[in-house]
Image (cartoon, helix red, strand yellow):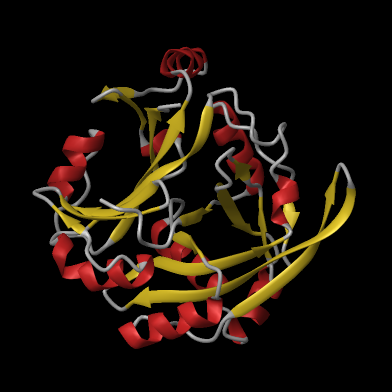
Amino acid sequence: MASDGRAIDHLVLPVAGLDRARAAFGRLGFTVAPDARHPFGTGNACIYFADGRYLEPLAVIDEAACDAAEADGLVFVARTRHFLAAAGEGLAMVALRSDDVDADRRSFEQAGFSSGPPFEFRRKAKTDAGEIEIGVELAFATTPDADLVTAFACRRFGTEALFTPESVAHANGARGVAGVVMTAENPTDHQYYLQAITNCRDPHASSLGIEAHGAGCSLSIVSPRAFAAMFGETVPETDPLRLRAFSLLVDDPDRLRLLLEEAGVGYRRIGGRVIVPQEDALGTTIAFEPSQR
């Protein structure tokens, strides 16, 4: 299928604490960036990849600041806290790349999935070249059918400087994000939401579910039974729409397996992929698949 939709930019994974996230993802062979604080009460410890995408383990670090931000209507904080309270740790949000956040917000609104006006945030960041300003502009898209799933269009400012050769080099060989998988009892019930957030007008339908592609990665919704076959993990048959797993491209699966074994991490091999179960990845299933480079 052609790459005609919005591409995945990054994934947001709420965690109980940044030290906990650093330990868990470090054990899996990831290089984790230094902690960063947000003025609205959250903080992150990101994992950057050579493909320009990243993971954002995110924790609440200032409850009072989060209270104020939530009272001001900041969707990012409200949805993060709700996810932590209702589901614990896991994959809560998917950011899609945007060149025009206002246009994307209008698109979400026309489809019936907009969650308020765009939000812009900037902060100072230290790099090898000195202190720079980085930031993001976001437009959120949520669905009443899934209070634990959040998508948002994201335009970044100045963040290219964070993707250094050192920050994107991982002991596990991970190079980038290949895709994200959601589950739902009836995947096609959520087709309009998938189309709206990805801007993919014609998702591919199969016996597994529905899938949209954008710039080399995919976002799909599959049935619980299909998820079990793909990842070897059981999820409730009647759960509402949930973000369950993401796939990463990896250079050397043999090196990855050795690293996991030395770290005492359990994994399974399914269809050429190495699957790390959610209990070893803070609530999210991770699939490592061989890079084609």
Residue displayed at 42% across by 13% down? 254
Residue 62 x, y percent position in the rendering: 70, 65
Residue displayed at 59% across by 22% down? 171
Residue displayed at 36% across by 65% down? 198
Residue 118 x, y percent position in the rendering: 57, 81
Q: Quadrant of residue 112?
A: bottom left
Q: Which residue extends farthest right?
A: 130
Closest to the observer, 22 or 180: 180
Residue 124 visible in image: yes
Closest to the observer, 137 or 30: 137
For residue 78, above or below residue 262: below
For residue 94, above or below residue 74: above
User: Viewed as shown, does residue 76 lie left or right of 150?
Assistant: right
Residue 35 visible in image: no
Residue 24 x, y percent position in the rendering: 55, 34
How many badges with numbers are in the image?
0
Closest to the observer, 58 or 229: 229
Residue displayed at 22% across by 64% down? 202
Closest to the observer, 41 or 54: 54
Residue 277 x, y percent position in the rendering: 36, 34
User: Viewed as shown, does residue 165 lie left or right of 92?
Assistant: right
